[in-house]
Amino acid sequence: MTRTRWWHLAVAGSLVVVAALVAATPMPPAWTTPTAIAVLAAFGLFYAVAARRALDDRRWAMPLIVAVVITVAAGTALSPNVATLQCIAFPMIWALCPGGSMRRPILTCIVMAAAVAAGFWIRLGGGPDALVQGVVIESVSVALGIGIGVWFTTEMRAGDENTRLLAELTAAQGQLAAMHREAGAGAERERLARELHDTIAQNLTSLVMLAQRGQNRGADEAGMRDDFELIEQVARDALTEARALVASTASVAVDGGLRAAIERLVATFERETRIEIETQLDDVGALSRELEVVLLRCAQEALANVRKHAGASHVRLVLERRDGGAITLAISDDGVGIGDAPPASTGFGLDGMRQRLALVGGDLRVASLAGAGTELVATVREEES
């Protein structure tokens, strides 16, 4: 809308100025001046009534181009001042000619220049001198008109290409952002799956084992009471873990430090399984919350594997800081072992531990012991400040 309004103002202003020049410099015979003004008025009326739509409706483009050429050529034959309209006629041709090629507007400009040159020839009385004068004037005019039109069209095409490239870049950025969101959502799903496996699933497994053991106790009321206390404690732990996950808070309680958290874990495990655990918990100093959570999760998963797969009667758990600043958590048992090579993990157990450790720059080693049983060693390193 803004572009067409400026075109309308430019056409109207040009017609008014040229009509004023024609009226101010009358040419003989006397009828030519009012006739030239009438030609300008007729074009103005034609433009106002219908042809101004050409800028929005391409069906009107060719009629308007023909009207411009006829008006300038005929008007120049009546008054040379009408040739001044070429300042708006050339740009209008470039704006209205359909198609992406520059050949059509260039040819149209040449046709108009030739017609205006003929108008000069007629107005100047004919003859070779008039023809030379008209050709020279129009050669300069058409050269400027074509040169400016080619430059302007080239710049417009470059702008359109830049706009297209920007749109493609914006679309690509949108797709990349969507992929990042999808990857983030997938990583979050994996994280929640690991959390559920390491927390609620283990707690529910403990509840099942305790319930089965309670059923087998028969009349042992003291043992049953102890089992019920454990069931209550495990259920409360599961509830706490579930609330922590829902609230997106820390997924494990390490209040009092890693050493205290492992001691609580060991005590609960011994009560649930009746498996003796020998601990060596050195003072490893203050660790980041992230490292504490990772090491405690590794301890939970290792003990869960002992309970489910090892068939062990004795477990040794060691937490220590080695030379170089590495903190290691080693869990070994006297169970059945895993063979000569670590098994390929298909769940969230060992794979989950490896992923957790990898996120903090740690590593995991799992191997069978020389006699019987399995040893799991998780190693992390504090970042240097």
Image: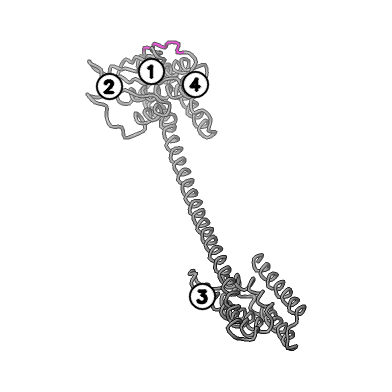
Q: Residues within 10 Å of mark 4 (few under 14, many from 20)?
A: few
What residue would you read off at disc 4?
A: 288
Instruction: Check residue 329 in the rendering and tell me which mark sits there, or answer none.
Output: 1
What residue would you read off at disc 3?
A: 107
| Res. 63 visible in picture | no
x 54%, y 61%: residue = 156
Would residue 161 appear left or right of 121 to someone viewing this image? left
Q: What's under tag 4, amino acid-wise?
A: Ser
Q: Secondary structure at mark 2?
A: strand
Upstream in sequence: badge 1 or badge 2: 1
Please state the extent of the stretch shown in magenta in the rendering. 278-284
Q: Are marks 1 and 2 in contact (CB under 8 Å)?
A: no
Q: What's under tag 1, amino acid-wise?
A: Leu
Residue 198 in the image, given as x and y percentages of width and height: 41, 29
Quadrant of image for the N terminus? bottom right
Q: Are marks 3 and 2 in contact (CB under 8 Å)?
A: no
Q: Nearer the viewer, mark 1 or mark 4?
A: 4
Q: What distance separates the C-alpha of mark 3 from that of mark 1? A: 86 Å
Upstream in sequence: badge 3 or badge 1: 3
Q: What distance separates the C-alpha of mark 4 from that of mark 2? A: 28 Å
Residue 162 in the image, given as x and y percentages of width and height: 51, 55
Q: What distance separates the C-alpha of mark 1 from that of mark 2? A: 14 Å
Q: Secondary structure at mark 3?
A: helix
What residue would you read off at disc 2?
A: 367
